[in-house]
Image (cartoon, rainbow, N blue to C red):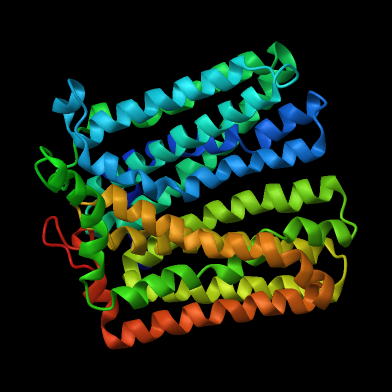
Amino acid sequence: MTEVMQGRRSWVDAVKPYAEKAPLAAFFLGVSSGFPFAMIGATLTTRLAQDGIDKKAVTAFTLAFLVYNLKWIWAWIVDGVRVPIIGRLGQRVSWLLIAGALSILAVVNLALVDPTTSLLQTAYAAILVGVAGATYDIVIDAYRIEILEPRQLGIGSGMSQYGWRIGSVAAGSLALVLAARIGWHGAYLACAVFALPAMLTGLIVGEPTRHREAVSRRGLGEVWQSIAGPLAEFFRRRGAFLVLLFILLHKIGDTLANLTFRLLFDDMGYSNDEIAIYDVGMGFWAYLVGIFIGGILYARLGMKRSVLISLVLMCVSNFSFAALAALGKSNWGMAGAIGFENFASGIGGVTVVAYFSALCDLRFTASQYALISAAASIVGRFLTGTTAGALIERFGYVDFYLLTTGLAVPGILLFWLMMRAGLIDASVGTAATAGKDQPAA
């Protein structure tokens, strides 16, 4: 009986942090963060295809996503510019309202354009959604990091990932359902409401108590400090260049593998129904489970060990696709590979995001996290776009996925070496230490 009670108490203790105010707020922030991405992703692709737009033109619209990799260029504005009138609500809350309103207006604008009449205007509208969504991302990430205490970074990152996935899927699904009944214009207009959860969260929760003002913004010197300060502060830390190298390297293998799965499934002869069941359906739920486990690992094991475990799991997940390619078409094999890959990605999405959040200085949260998140994906995306297809044609799928597995190893070894040298603790920012005397990790 005592063992049963202890097991029940342990389960309650594991779930309880997810119900705290700040992690719940992170969930609603994630919902709003995910919806602009969905509006210019598969949803827009479907709309253009149904309007009879040429396939080459449709795929060109994916360039709108590049805006997300460039958001660090203007992230300093969110840290360094005070919004008139509503600025009294606080630097983060006022920018949440501004960026949310811009996202709504951008989606409404995309709703009103007609691709069959002017494809160029549609392209401009899609890019505008990308700019507004990326700006919303900058503010949301900064607000999330600053409302979470250091002990909550893992759980909060997990809740944000839950919100992002659910927000993007819900917005995309709602758009498809409504488009079949009231047309694309009405569908996009309805989806604009997904910007509201983060705005309302900001108004309800208020300005983060951990937010630190960087400078008094009155002259050109202070503006320059807003731009250069985040970089200068980061590179003054011990081990900063090795940390940057890890950020650039750690996801190369994973990105190369992830962006080629559909090519593998198509060449192996899987039907659209099979892909929908295993890749989309099972992958979605495995990812959500991984997020939950990732939050628990971060809370129980601390930042360093949980990140190292997640890096190893993501490396092994690439190997599972080499095994699938060698095995040949197998629904069970596909289910296992997809399930494990999404489970590992869910854990990594929590622990690694929490680590990157911990690297921020609370004076420059928006600028530094925008730069870190952009650097984390840009190398892998560039290599995928320029070499993945040629590598698959030359080596075949088995050797290609073995290569992606090998490319994940340097990131694991580098992180382990940084742990041994004490550079992980030395390089974290005040986001990992400020607030109720919580340890960094």
Residue at 19% in and 33% down: 82
Q: Residue furthest front?
A: 220
Q: Position of residue 319 (x, y in %)?
A: 68, 76
Would you identify the image quadrant in which residue 435 lies?
Answer: bottom left
The answer to whether residue 44 is above or below residue 382 is above
Q: Nearer the viewer, residue 406 or 67?
A: 67
Q: Quadrant of the C terminus?
A: bottom left
Residue at 45% in and 27% down: 103
Answer yes or no: is residue 12 visible: no
Answer yes or no: is residue 146 visible: yes
Q: Nearer the viewer, residue 138 or 15?
A: 138
Q: Nearer the viewer, residue 45 or 126?
A: 126
* Residue 60 relative to residue 79: left or right: right
Q: Position of residue 50 (x, y in %)?
A: 79, 26
* Residue 90 relative to residue 410: left or right: left
Residue at 46% in and 69% down: 248
Would you identify the image quadrant in which residue 432 lies?
Answer: bottom left
* Residue 267 relative to residue 257: left or right: right
Q: Position of residue 104 (x, y in %)?
A: 45, 22
Q: Position of residue 315 (x, y in %)?
A: 58, 75
The answer to whether residue 430 is above or below residue 314 is above
Tell me how many marks there are: 0
Residue at 48% in and 42% down: 164
Q: Residue furthest right?
A: 269
Q: Nearer the viewer, residue 130 or 331?
A: 130
Would you identify the image quadrant in which residue 351 lies?
Answer: bottom left
Q: Quadrant of the N terminus?
A: bottom left
